[in-house]
Image (cartoon, rainbow, N blue to C red):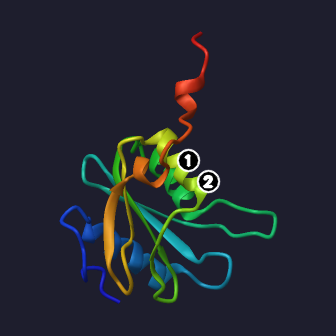
């Protein structure tokens, strides 16, 4: 499945390809089925793999937030999640959308567009219209 079919100009194809490569080569079994890749403002790509467990577990997008912080990457411009077994780009769940909005309100999220392998990049705020922003509701110290 090509990540370049039906794309918009804002789609970071290298980011999609990086996540797809890790999904093909590192996801094995039911515990690791989704890879997220994030683009740092300095150009680096950081990847993370979900850690599924029957008690819950972090999605790949949350893992990549922590992995990037461990590498000193705090500002990100784009993120994408790709499923294993050639499932292609998948949208973030509600919890991940909220975390991405709170941590990176200016980030673009690459999501499916239409059918097949079409993708598009959208600002995180468009994935959570009329959203609650945690930082906006904190009391001043």
Q: Is residue 140 above or below residue 56?
A: above
* Marks 2 and 1 in Cβ contact (< 8 Å): yes
* Residue occupied by mark 1: 98
On the question of residue 88 being in view, the answer is yes
Q: Nearer the viewer, residue 86 or 47?
A: 86
Query: Judging from the image, what secondary structure is the residue with disc 1 in?
Result: helix
Q: Write down the quadrant of residue 38 in the picture.
A: bottom left
Q: Residue at x 26, y 65 (%)?
A: 12
Residue 50: horizontal and vertical position, in percent? 60, 67
CA distance for labels 2 and 1: 5 Å
Q: Residue at x 54, y 73 (%)?
A: 34
Q: Residue at x 80, y 70 (%)?
A: 54
* Residue occupied by mark 2: 95
Left or right of residue 123: residue 67? right
Q: Is residue 44 above or below residue 60?
A: above
Q: Which disc number belongs to residue 2?
A: none
């Amino acid at each position: 499945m090509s990540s370049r079919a039906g794309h918009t100009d804002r789609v970071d194809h290298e980011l999609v390809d990086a996540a797809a490569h890790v999904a093909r080569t590192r996801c094995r079994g039911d515990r690791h089925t989704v890879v997220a890749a994030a683009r740092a403002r300095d150009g680096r790509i950081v990847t993370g793999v979900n850690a599924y467990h029957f008690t819950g577990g972090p999605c790949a997008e949350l893992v990549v937030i922590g992995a990037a912080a461990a590498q000193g990457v705090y500002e990100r411009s784009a993120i994408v999640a790709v499923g294993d077994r050639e499932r292609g780009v998948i949208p973030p769940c509600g919890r991940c959308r909220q975390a991405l909005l709170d941590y990176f309100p200016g980030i673009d999220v690459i999501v499916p567009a239409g059918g097949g392998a079409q993708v598009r990049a959208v600002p995180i705020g468009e994935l959570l219209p009329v959203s609650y922003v945690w930082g906006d509701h904190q009391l001043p110290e």
